[in-house]
Amino acid sequence: MNILLYLIPLALGLGLAGLLAFLWSLHSHQFDDLEGAGWRAISDDDLDTKQ
């Protein structure tokens, strides 16, 4: 039963850390361009490389 005194605050702290990380990523505009990275991955820009 004493282990709950450690586990409950630890779980709340980890949940709060996850929430803060998510809010930080929203604030720093990480989710603005969801499709751009996918299109850049499949685009054909091999013309810029020298062989």
Image (tube, rainbow, N blue to C red):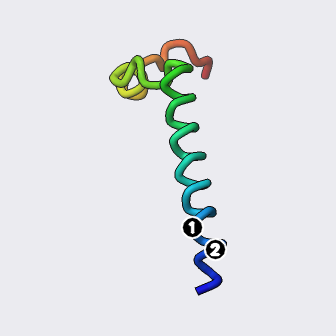
Q: Amino acid at mark 1?
A: Ile
* Point 37% across, 27% down: residue: 38
Residue furthest out toward the bottom? 1
Q: Using a 10 Å C-alpha cutoff, classify the residue at mark 1 as few (fewer than 14 neighbours), some (14 to 19) or many (20 or more).
A: few
Measure the alpha-carbon separation of dots 2 and 1.
6 Å
Where residue 46 sits in the image (x, y, percent)? 48, 20
Task: Indicate the secondary structure of the residue bearing disc 2.
Answer: helix
Q: Is residue 36 left or right of residue 9?
A: left
Q: Quadrant of residue 14?
A: bottom right
Q: Check disc 2 and give the amino acid type.
A: Leu
Q: Relative to 47, is 1 above or below?
A: below
Residue positioned 53% across, 52% down in the render: 15
Q: State the image coordinates of residue 11 (x, y, percent, origin top left).
A: 56, 62
Q: How many marks?
A: 2
The N terminus sits in image quarter: bottom right
25 or 42, nearer to the observer: 25
Q: Residues within 10 Å of mark 2 (few under 14, many from 20)?
A: few
